[in-house]
Amino acid sequence: MEESQELALTQLRKSVEKLSSSTEGYEVPTLMRFLVARSMNPDKAAKMFVDWQKWRASMVPPNGISDSEVKDELDFRKICLQGPTKSGHPMVLVLTSKHFPAKDQVVFKKFVVHVLDKTIASGIKGKEVGDEKLVAVIDLSNITYKNLDACGLITGFQFLQSYYPERLAKCYILHMPGFFLTVWRFVCRFLEKATQEKIVIVTEGEEERKFKEEIGLDALPEEYGGKAKLTLIQDVLPQTSPQMLTTNNNNV
């Protein structure tokens, strides 16, 4: 590790203490994610870290959000969990044609957390390192106006940006219809530059070939030209709640 990074980590820990919290129990890769997300600014990273701790404590039970708490959203059968990709990351696939704007926003937010936590946990081999990432694929094929949900998209991306810093490796958007462009331009107003740079709108031809190559045929479902079977997220056996995803309530 470079001396500048070690200095930033030391300053981050001190800044967190000044905010009446602690980094005890959190490994360097986890702390580095917050620093990278805030351009290596220790004070801004510390605020983000403490805000995350408070959010986890208020939003997520110690053992995570169970399937039963988000059953209504799971019943739409719109989220699949695949992978690992060629880069070694778990892949969450969103079948947007099966999504409808949520009537209960509290449950929907819990659902987003449930999906992100379970996806990240599925990529942990043994002990969590703290810098595990995920790949997201948003499939817009066969969507109608009933499936449009700008608020839902914004919620998902804002959660990633605010509470899962540097967890997103890449996001691919497939089969974007022309009428969705207006929605997407609106959503992009809420995306940080770093997030936008990780998003690829896949079109036919070279981009589609590159998408398949980067995901890998072993992880890509047959419906997309790969060899894998589609697996609903609720059919994937849950992993033990990883330490770095849960909040140490003594530190809040």
Image (spheres, rainbow, N blue to C red):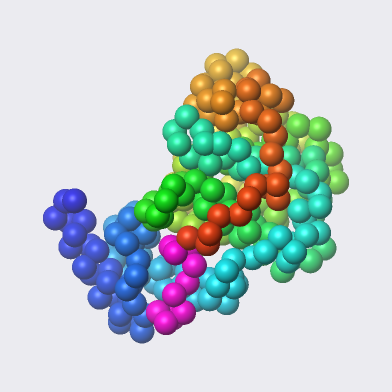
Q: Residue at x 78, y 46 (%)?
A: 77
| Viewer can see residue 172 | yes
Where residue 186 appears, as percent x and y from the top left, is: 65, 48
Q: Position of residue 190 (x, y in %)?
A: 57, 54
Q: Say which quadrant the C terminus sits in.
A: bottom left
Q: What residue appears at the point 47 percent right and 72 percent down from the top-left corner? A: 247
Image point 56% across, 55% down: which residue? 239
Residue in view at x 57 percent, y 23 percent: 217
Q: Position of residue 220 (x, y in %)?
A: 61, 28
Between 211 and 197, the one lying in front of the other is 211
178 or 4: nearer the viewer? 4
Does the magenta run of residues contain 155?
no
Residue span colored magenta? 243-252
Residue ranking furthest to the bottom: 20
- Residue 5 falls left or right of residue 239: left
Seen in the picture, residue 175 relative to 31 is either above or below; the reply is above
- Evaluate whether residue 211 shows in this view: no
